[in-house]
Image (tube, rainbow, N blue to C red):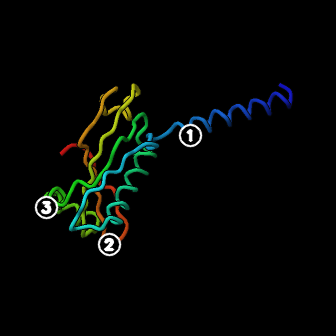
């Protein structure tokens, strides 16, 4: 193999790697963020939590398209706070927030645990934080 052929093969390999890396993660390009009023959290605090999940989805939810996401509401958050009170101890957190979303799964089936060619509505995301700090995604799924 001559030097030019080696360079061409190396270039093609780089292109394949870049294309593979770009294909990773979920589609969040057209996600609709629904606004829900809260007496517990400010709009900024809710949006901060939403952005954590959008990044999570973008990075790790291969074959899925996030359709919408919103704050689940004060009632749901209070209920889950009681249910997940042990989670506070595990993560050293003193606050919990619940988001809800809808997303589609394509023919690749996401990570294999999801039904292919389906839509998930009312999917919950649980995040915690301590002392008003950064939200941390700790759980997700159907309740």
Count the labels in the image.
Answer: 3
* CB within 8 Å, label 1 to label 3: no
Instruction: Provide residue 112's location: percent of width, then percent of height.
Output: 35, 31
The residue at 56%/40% (across/down) is: 21
Identify the disc placed on residue 21: 1
Task: Give the x, y percent position of residue 75.
Answer: 14, 58
Residue 82 tag number: 3
Label 1 SS: helix
Determine which residue is flagged by label 2.
132
Q: Up-down: is 99 above or below 43?
A: above
Task: Please tell me in which quadrant of the rendered image residue 65 appears.
Answer: top left
Q: Where 86 falls versus 56 (above or below)? A: below
Residue 50 is situated, as x and y percent measured from the top left of the image, at 35, 55
Q: Earlier in the sequence, mark 2 or mark 3?
A: 3
Q: Secondary structure at mark 3?
A: helix
Instruction: Check if mark 2's residue and mark 3's residue have beta carbons within 8 Å.
Output: no
């Amino acid at each position: 193999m001559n030097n030019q052929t080696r360079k061409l093969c190396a270039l093609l390999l780089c292109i394949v790697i870049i294309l593979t890396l770009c294909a990773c993660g979920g589609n969040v390009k057209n996600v609709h963020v629904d606004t829900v009023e809260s007496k517990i959290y400010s709009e900024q605090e809710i949006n901060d939590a939403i952005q954590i999940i959008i990044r999570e989805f973008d990075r790790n939810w291969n074959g899925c398209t996030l359709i919408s996401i919103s704050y689940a509401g004060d009632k749901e958050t209070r209920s889950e706070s009681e249910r997940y009170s042990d989670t506070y101890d595990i993560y050293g957190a003193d606050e919990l927030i619940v988001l809800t979303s809808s997303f589609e799964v394509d023919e690749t089936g996401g990570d294999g645990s999801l039904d292919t060619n389906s839509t998930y509505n009312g999917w919950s995301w649980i995040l915690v934080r301590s002392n008003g700090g950064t939200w941390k995604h700790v759980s997700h799924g159907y309740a």
